[in-house]
Image (cartoon, rainbow, N blue to C red):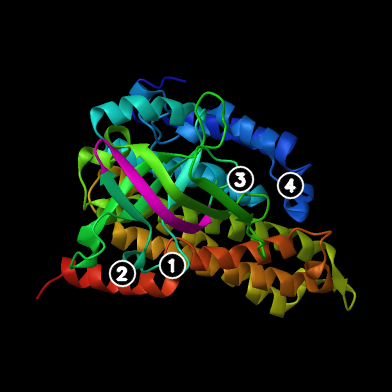
Amino acid sequence: MDMDTATISEADERALLDSIDRWLVKKVAPVADRFEQADEYPHELVADMCEMGLFGALIEPEYGGLGLSALTYARIVARISEEWMSLTGFFNSHLMMALIVQKFGTQRQKEHWLPRFATGELRGGLGLTEADAGTDLQGIRVVAKRDGDQYRVNGAKLWITNALEGDILALLVKTDPDAQPRHRGMTMLIVPTRDMETRAELPGVKRGRKLPKLGYRGIDTGEIAFDDYVCDADLSLVGGKEGEGFLMATGGLEIGRVNVAARGVGIARRALKESVSYAQIRKTMGKPIAEHQAIQLKLGEMAAKTRAAELLVEDAARAYDRGGRVDLEAGMAKWFATETAFEVATEAMRIFGANGYSKEYPIERLYRDAPLLIIGEGTNEMQRIIIARRLIARNPV
């Protein structure tokens, strides 16, 4: 594959997607249920994703990444989510961290961190959420104080992907807790949590529990705290500037919302595919349930909404690739695709009946995974507010 440019040809994209499809059939499908039900970290599958370059999917080729477009990336995420959504979280959270460095970092920071991020040598995520700060990021309380050429960090983060097995975080902190408005006191730091050579825990890092969850299992969503943790200011202070962390965090969330929307597409597709197949096999009253009008009504609506979600995600990804603000497009895709995932998974369970409630079929996992998408990367209530505000801003009277 020619990676000299930041985009790939249609033929190369097909080849990449085909290779991922083969991996999903050969390596993921046979073990996904076992890892998911045991809530066990899939070390071998994560290593496979490193080898395929997925941890560098959106990182520029000059730093060793694949330099894929957001459109190709969204298609990858949707395909993997059809088989096991949790796998997409490992590299998406990591790439949100990497894009913050790529978009806002100093040249030294890019050269130091991005090649290690691209290979998956250093894997990490985004440290935003706290016990009292989720969608309202300005409510964070983790504090970092400048001490010469270092920062000293104190506080705890929650609901962090790659918190336990990961090596590094893009950490949103308060460097001026008294600033008004609050976002002016927020700063983004890149903070290693392990020694890059020995992988030993760094002083001041305290990893908490792995959070038990309804769905999205196997991935290490957890707590991580910092107690007088010290990091190098030159390498850690993104862009060399304090007070711009809120902008960096919200900028990183745009690709996160495209990702979550693409996950919704994957879940809806799989639920629809399973339902269409099952409806032709399961019989009631002497004929396949696919011949009953009640089931046909469900399948028709499921199919139309799934296709509409696909198109909205493609629209958002193309807008992202063009550059500029995409909170309107990403918000619409995130809201519609994730609500569709939940609706289609729910209708699939109705079509499957008791079998949909059984762990012997994939429907119950899709049904458990879908609600996360409605909540994560900004609640869908907030997405609708963002859509309306941007719509008005773009169309003043």
Q: Is residue 159 magenta?
A: yes
Quarter of the rendering occupied by the C terminus:
bottom left
Q: Which residue is mark 4?
A: 32
Residue 87 circle label: 3
Q: Quadrant of residue 115?
A: top left
Neighbours of disc 3 within 10 Å: few (<14), some (14-19), many (20+): many
Q: Residue at x 59, y 46 (%)?
A: 164
Residue 41 rendering spot, x and y as whole percentages: 69, 44
Q: Which residue is mark 1?
A: 335
Toward the viewer: 131 or 257? 131
Of the two numbered discs 1 and 2 on the same chain, state the one appearing first in sequence. 1
Circles 4 and 2: CB atoms closer than 8 Å: no
Viewer-side label of 3, 2: 3
| Mark 1 vs mark 3, CA separation in Å | 21 Å
Task: Check the image and report above or below for 106 versus 181.
Answer: above
Viewer-side label of 4, 2: 4
Judged left or right of residue 106, residue 313 is: right
- Find the magenta span and give its range: 147-160
Q: Which residue is mark 2?
A: 387
Of the two numbered discs 3 and 4 on the same chain, state the one appearing first in sequence. 4
